[in-house]
């Protein structure tokens, strides 16, 4: 990927190597962290070089009478005005600067505009959230609706204590996993994987590990069902837990979109999930769920950067098979010190969700010793 802002924009901080060299460096760093637990070569799943990021957030910087896209600069002591961003997905790139031109032509649309967030899909859908430091009136709504029509996009307006959804607040992504298509509603403000091309590879890798496990699956931190729905094809039943009400709502909608009926989504955090499975505490949210009918063989965890807490680690150790997807290899290595007292790492992989940055997603599959 070539970008005139390399070395100046803080969005990409791994700019002085080729993509292949940067990925090799990142993979070696993960291998070094995990070498105590896994000596085989990690599988490496690379991204496409450009046009890979489906979520993007840009500051709006006002210079004179014009708005500009901006990012914090690489030294974190100022901003870099942007004239391009080659890493965004095509649904964003084909509209981004035409949209800015239309905004600059309107006093109503550019007045106190603070930032713009984009959520795109491989199929071309685009949701744009325009965030302001002022209350949005009817005149703003009318002009923003014209933008929706002109660019065939969906727009949400936000300001303090105000959210205006002009048409809809989600896009529908379609992922190809193992030759099968899965549809997902991605809502504004909800967590989604940033790189759909690598996400497909990541889900496929997990399926390859567990497809012959049999029994039932427990998934913690399930989000909107990114892994849950494709994995449900390979287990009798799935119990999936997540703390966010909005994510649970989206996950249930995504089940309906895909005709899946063997998943039970429950709003529990990681510690509560461990308590529920151990039956050390009763939950009103589980009054209609019979945990005794589950014959769990496998657990999948995809925690935040902080990794697993002690209760979650102990819960995972009670399963024959563990799939651990991590956005922080340091906390993954920390958790493996405990998990590898009862299990061994059979497979490991890295997934380059974030090209040209130092961030990398990794995954391990463990079996009981």
Image: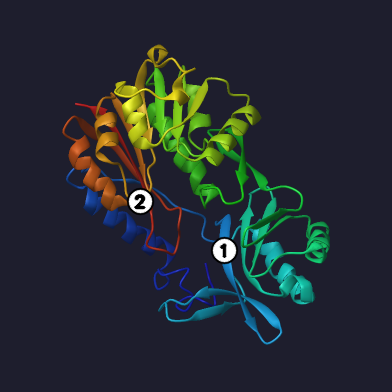
Q: Is residue 158 above or below residue 112?
A: above
In this rendering, position of residue 115 left or right of residue 262: right
Residue at position x 37%, y 50% from top?
327
Residue 180: x %, y % from top left: 59, 31
Q: Residues within 10 Å of mark 2 (few under 14, many from 20)?
A: few
In-front residue for pair 330/36: 330
Mark-to-mark CA distance, 1 and 2: 20 Å
Residue under circle 1? Answer: 57
What residue sits 40% from the left and 68% below the top?
Answer: 14
Q: Is residue 85 visible?
A: no
Image spot of residue 259 (x, y percent):
63, 24
Q: Nearer the viewer, residue 291 or 86?
A: 291
Q: Quadrant of residue 261?
A: top right
| Quadrant of the rendering where the C terminus is positioned | top left
For the residue carrying disc 1, how many other residues have a C-alpha within 10 Å: few (<14), some (14-19), or many (20+)?
A: some
Residue lying at the far top in this picture: please name it: 293
Q: Secondary structure at mark 2?
A: loop
Q: How is the image coloured?
A: rainbow
In the rendered image of this protein, does residue 277 appear above or below residue 82?
above
Quick one: label 1 or label 2, which is nearer the N terminus?
1
**Whole-percent x, y for residue 363 in the image:** 35, 42
In this picture, is 336 found above or below 292? below
78 with respect to 183 (left or right): left
The number of numbered badges drawn on the structure is 2
Q: Quadrant of residue 214?
A: top left
Residue at left offset 24%, top offset 42%? 335
Residue 128, given in percent of the width and then of the height, sits at 67, 58
**SS type, badge 1:** strand
Asked which quadrant contains residue 179, the reply is top right
> Can residue 258 be seen in this snapshot?
yes
Q: Which residue is mark 2?
A: 305
Q: Residue at x 38, y 30 (%)?
A: 209
């Amino acid at each position: 990927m070539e970008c005139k802002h390399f070395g100046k924009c803080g969005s990409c901080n791994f700019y002085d190597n080729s993509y292949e060299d940067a990925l090799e460096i990142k993979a070696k760093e993960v291998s070094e962290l995990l070498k105590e637990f896994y000596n085989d070569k990690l599988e490496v799943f690379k991204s496409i070089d450009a046009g890979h990021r489906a979520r993007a957030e840009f500051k709006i910087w006002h210079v004179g009478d014009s708005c500009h896209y901006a990012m914090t600069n690489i030294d974190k002591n100022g901003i870099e005005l942007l004239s391009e961003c080659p890493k965004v997905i095509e649904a964003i790139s084909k509209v981004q600067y035409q949209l800015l031109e239309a905004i600059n032509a309107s006093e109503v649309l550019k007045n106190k505009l603070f930032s713009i967030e984009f959520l795109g899909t491989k199929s071309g859908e685009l949701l744009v959230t325009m965030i302001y430091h002022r209350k949005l009136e009817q005149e703003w709504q009318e002009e923003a609706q014209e933008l929706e029509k002109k660019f065939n996009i969906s727009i949400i307006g936000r300001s303090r204590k105000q959210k205006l959804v002009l048409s809809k607040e989600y896009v529908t992504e379609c992922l190809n996993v193992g030759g099968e298509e899965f549809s997902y509603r991605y809502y504004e403000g909800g967590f989604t994987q940033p790189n759909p091309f690598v996400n497909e590879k990541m889900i496929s890798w997990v399926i390859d590990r567990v497809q012959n496990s049999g029994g039932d699956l427990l998934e913690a931190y399930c989000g909107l069902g990114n892994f849950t729905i494709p994995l449900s094809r390979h287990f009798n039943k799935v119990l999936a837990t997540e703390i966010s009400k909005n994510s649970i709502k989206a996950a249930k909608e995504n089940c309906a979109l895909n005709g899946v009926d063997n998943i039970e989504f429950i709003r529990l955090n990681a510690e509560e999930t461990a308590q529920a499975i151990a039956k050390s505490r009763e939950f009103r949210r589980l009054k209609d769920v019979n945990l005794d009918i589950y014959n769990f063989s496998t657990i999948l965890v995809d925690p935040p950067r902080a990794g697993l807490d002690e209760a979650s680690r102990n819960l995972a150790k009670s399963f024959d098979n563990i799939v651990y997807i991590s956005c922080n290899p340091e906390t993954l290595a920390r958790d493996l010190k405990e998990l590898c007292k009862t299990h061994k790492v059979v497979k490991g992989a890295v997934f380059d969700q974030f090209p040209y940055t130092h961030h990398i997603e990794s995954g391990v599959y463990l079996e009981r010793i």
